[in-house]
Amino acid sequence: MSHIRKSFDRRNFLRATAGTTVALAAASVTGAAATSAAAASSTLSIPKDRIGIQLYSIRDKVSSLGFAVVLAELARIGYQEIEFAGYTQSTSILGRQITLPEIRTLLDDHGLRAVGSHVGIGNLRTNLQGELDAAQILGMPHVGTANAPSNVNTVAAYRAAADEFNAWGAAATARGLKLYQHNHSGEFAFATDQPSVRLYDVFLKNTDPRHVYLELDIYWAYVGQYRWPGFDPAAYVRNQPYRYPLFHMKDGDANAANGNGYDIVEFGAGDLPYEKFIRDIGPRASHVGIWEQDTAPNTLPNPPGSLGAAERSFTALKGLLD
């Protein structure tokens, strides 16, 4: 289907969320304290004033127009948080490659905050301290990878990967940073050597929550649910809320002809159950919502192409969180 999602019923959604959190608060405190806790917990756990963007979504514009033009436009749209997918642009823009301090200046000039960065898992193996240096120069609190923990889908391989992430995470913690792993759908598959064991569960169980964090890509989690049923994406967050500082809020439109069960679409044009997901993760912790659309550079008309998708998706995300 390719319909535009009906406008969100904010009043009923917020009333349902508030009702859930009031019940939770009343179970643990009484009197005036219960009233105060209930009021505080009725706030959504994805702040509407911290909406972010993964720059991979507009990678064509970053490359061709450069960070100065792109960051100015994102600030105009209303984005607050920037997640990087590399630190380069066309050398024709400046006659050389842009530097990290120059990118940091652009962020500061436009009132933007670097929230995280996707780096290759190979970079973490060979240049961990350099990636942590880059994070600190840009002022970002998180640095992560979009790679699967392992390309070998066995329990032993995922345990070994967890050990590796624990070491990287401890190094990040020592520098005041948080290391995170971003999922695709494959992490929710079952181990080839133990078909009753979900790989994502192995990774969670064997990584140290003090040092290894997760960025839940909500779209890919629902694709994982479609392909390997038997889990609820929201339950992972609800059970360990403080391990999920970041979300990728990518929309999908159901399509039985697609092996993933969904097509990637602009936010608000799909039918993933975002209202239910936000309600079900509960009120604990705070999660930065980051828009991503892998296919945005193919959006027509082009121009504005991916930047047009970024603006329309921001409007839909803001509507969801208002």
Image: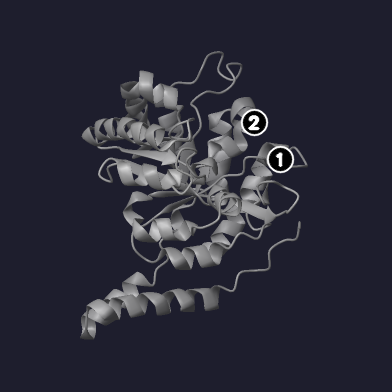
Instruction: Name which residue lies at 30% across and 33% down.
Output: 163
Question: Of residues 14 and 194, which is closer to you in this image?
Answer: 194
* Viewer-nearest residue: 314 or 162: 162
> Residue 312, relative to residue 110: is it above or below?
below
Q: Residue at x 33, y 28 (%)?
A: 132
Q: Residue 267 sits in which quadrant?
A: bottom right
**Quarter of the image where the N terminus is located:** bottom right
Residue assigned mark 1:
305
Q: Where is residue 216 in the image (x, y as percent from the top left)?
A: 46, 48
| Residue in the image at 52% along x and 67% along y | 276
Q: Is residue 312 above or below residue 146?
A: below
Number of on-image labels: 2
SS for callout 2: helix
Which x, y percent locates residue 127?
36, 20
Q: What residue type is labelled 2?
A: Asp
Q: Nearer the viewer, residue 102 or 146?
A: 146
Q: Which colour scheme is used?
A: one colour
Does the image show residue 48? no
* Mark sitting earlier along the chain (1/2): 2
Near mark 2 (Cα within 10 A), the count class, few <14, some 14-19 or many ≥20, is some
Residue lying at the far bottom of the rendered structure? 31
> Residue placed at 54% from the left, 37% from the top?
55
Q: What element carries label 1?
A: helix
Kindly indicate whether the residue at mark 2 contacts the one at mark 1 (C-beta within 8 angstroms): yes
Residue 3 left/right relative to 178: right
Residue holding disc 2? 60
Left/right placement of residue 224 relative to residue 27 reads right
Q: Residues within 10 Å of mark 1 (few under 14, many from 20)?
A: some
